Image: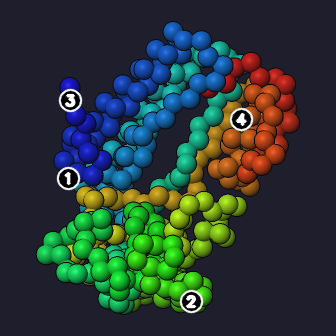
């Protein structure tokens, strides 16, 4: 069995071909299931629309900091979306005309300017202490950490998850609980002030989990960090010897995740040409439950979208 190319590779020809192959196989299987299985609700996920951004954004976007003019891959993303559009069209030929169709993404995409080596910064500040500094780029999980002297560390990719070594919570915690909030606030301010490679402000957001989530379960990160409005990714690897980098620690990557995703809804009695820009991702689930005639749990976050003409008119959904 052929193994598809990894999403982060310099072999762009194989990556492009494998993304198309993966997409063709997935849509072929979806059409098969639609024809051969009974269904009231049918859902599929296509990862190619994610992989193609990460692999080819700099070739498409002249504003990308690593754009290569007149490159042979500049049309890959547009060509891929034409293929996806064709595949969606074939998929819709398999469903009844009164089917409600949704296209939903969990995030968008934008050019990635560079990366912030958050653990390198924590080491320089003395917050993260190692037994020995690695001789090559090394994942945080493989570092020899001196936990008795470490006050904070970070994990994560597109955004940073920063953890504080709190006494009584972590096995070798060093920050007394009474000092936790003061330390966290100071750490947040210092991280927000990390500049780009030219010393310019990034406009970084540093958020607390309790300000984002209704309930914080388990040991959540103490801080979430979005560097430069997600135009800079978080790099957790140690060994690069720098805070700012333009090399991805997991392989070539041209794009980062963006805050705005996609929501498209069509079907019987759905108003055409309506732009709905007041919703959020959590609104999709209660909207689906309402369309299916199911009760929306009282504790569910998000609100159903106010498309009242959809009520009681559903026969099928994809």
SS label for mark 3: loop
The residue singled out by tag 2 in the image is 179
Q: Going 46% across and 28% down the picture, which residue do you hit?
A: 86
Give the residue at x 36% y 90%: 125
Dividing the picture into quadrants, the one containing residue 49 is top left
Closer to viewer: mark 2 or mark 1: 2
What is the CA distance from the residue labelled 3 to the residue labelled 1?
A: 19 Å
**Residue beneath the point at 44% across and 25% down:** 27
Q: CA distance from mark 2 to mark 4?
A: 45 Å
Tag 4 residue? 288
Between disc 1 and disc 4, the foreground one is: 4
Left or right: 288 with respect to 237? Answer: right
The one nearer the camera, 103 or 224, is 224
Across and down, in percent, residue 262 comes to 59, 47
Earlier-in-chain disc, 3 versus 2: 3
What distance separates the C-alpha of mark 3 from that of mark 2? 54 Å
Residue 28: x percent and y percent? 41, 20
Is there CB contact under 8 Å for labels 2 and 4?
Answer: no
Q: As drawn, is 102 to the left or to the right of 110?
A: right
- Count neighbours of disc 2 (C-alpha within 10 A) and say few if under 14, some if 14 to 19, many if 20 or more: few
Quadrant where the image shows the C terminus? top right
Can the viewer see residue 238 in this picture? yes
Does 5 sit above or below residue 224? above
Please give the name of the residue rendered at 36% of the width and 46% of the height, measured from the top-left corner: 52
According to the picture, the residue beneath numbered tag 3 turns out to be 2
Other residues around mark 3 within 10 Å, as few (<14) / some (14–19) / many (≥20): few
Q: Which residue is mark 1?
A: 10
Is tag 1's residue or tag 4's residue first in the polypeptide sequence?
1
Of circles 3 and 2, which is in front?
Answer: 2
- Residue 201, percent from left and from top: 47, 86
Q: CA distance from mark 2 to mark 1?
A: 47 Å
Task: Choose the circle earlier in sequence order: 4 or 3.
Answer: 3
């Amino acid at each position: 069995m052929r193994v598809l190319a990894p999403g982060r590779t310099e072999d762009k020809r194989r990556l492009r071909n494998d993304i198309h192959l993966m997409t063709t196989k997935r849509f072929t299987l979806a059409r098969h299931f639609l024809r051969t299985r009974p269904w009231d609700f049918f859902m599929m996920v296509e990862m190619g629309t994610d992989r193609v951004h990460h692999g080819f954004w700099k070739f498409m976007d002249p504003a990308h900091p690593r754009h290569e003019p007149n490159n042979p891959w500049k049309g890959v993303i547009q060509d891929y979306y034409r293929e996806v559009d064709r595949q969606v069209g074939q998929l819709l030929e398999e469903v009844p005309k009164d089917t409600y169709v949704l296209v939903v993404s969990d995030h968008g995409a934008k050019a990635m300017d560079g990366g912030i080596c958050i653990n390198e910064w924590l080491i320089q500040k003395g917050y993260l202490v190692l037994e020995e500094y690695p001789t090559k780029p090394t994942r945080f999980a493989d570092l020899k950490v001196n936990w008795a002297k470490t006050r904070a560390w970070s994990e994560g990719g597109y955004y940073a998850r920063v953890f504080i070594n709190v006494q009584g919570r972590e096995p070798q915690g060093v920050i007394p609980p009474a000092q936790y909030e003061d330390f966290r606030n100071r750490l947040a301010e210092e991280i927000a002030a990390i500049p780009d490679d030219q010393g310019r402000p990034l406009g970084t957001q540093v958020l607390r989990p309790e300000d984002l989530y209704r309930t914080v379960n388990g040991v959540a990160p103490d801080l979430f960090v979005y560097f430069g409005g997600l135009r800079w990714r978080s790099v957790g690897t140690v060994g690069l010897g720098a805070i700012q980098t333009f090399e991805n620690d997991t392989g070539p990557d041209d794009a980062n995740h963006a805050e705005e995703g996609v929501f498209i809804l069509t079907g019987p009695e759905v108003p055409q040409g309506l732009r709905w820009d007041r919703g959020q991702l959590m609104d999709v689930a209660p909207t689906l439950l309402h369309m299916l005639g199911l009760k929306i749990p009282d504790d569910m976050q998000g609100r159903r979208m106010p498309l009242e003409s959809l009520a009681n008119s559903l026969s099928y959904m994809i």
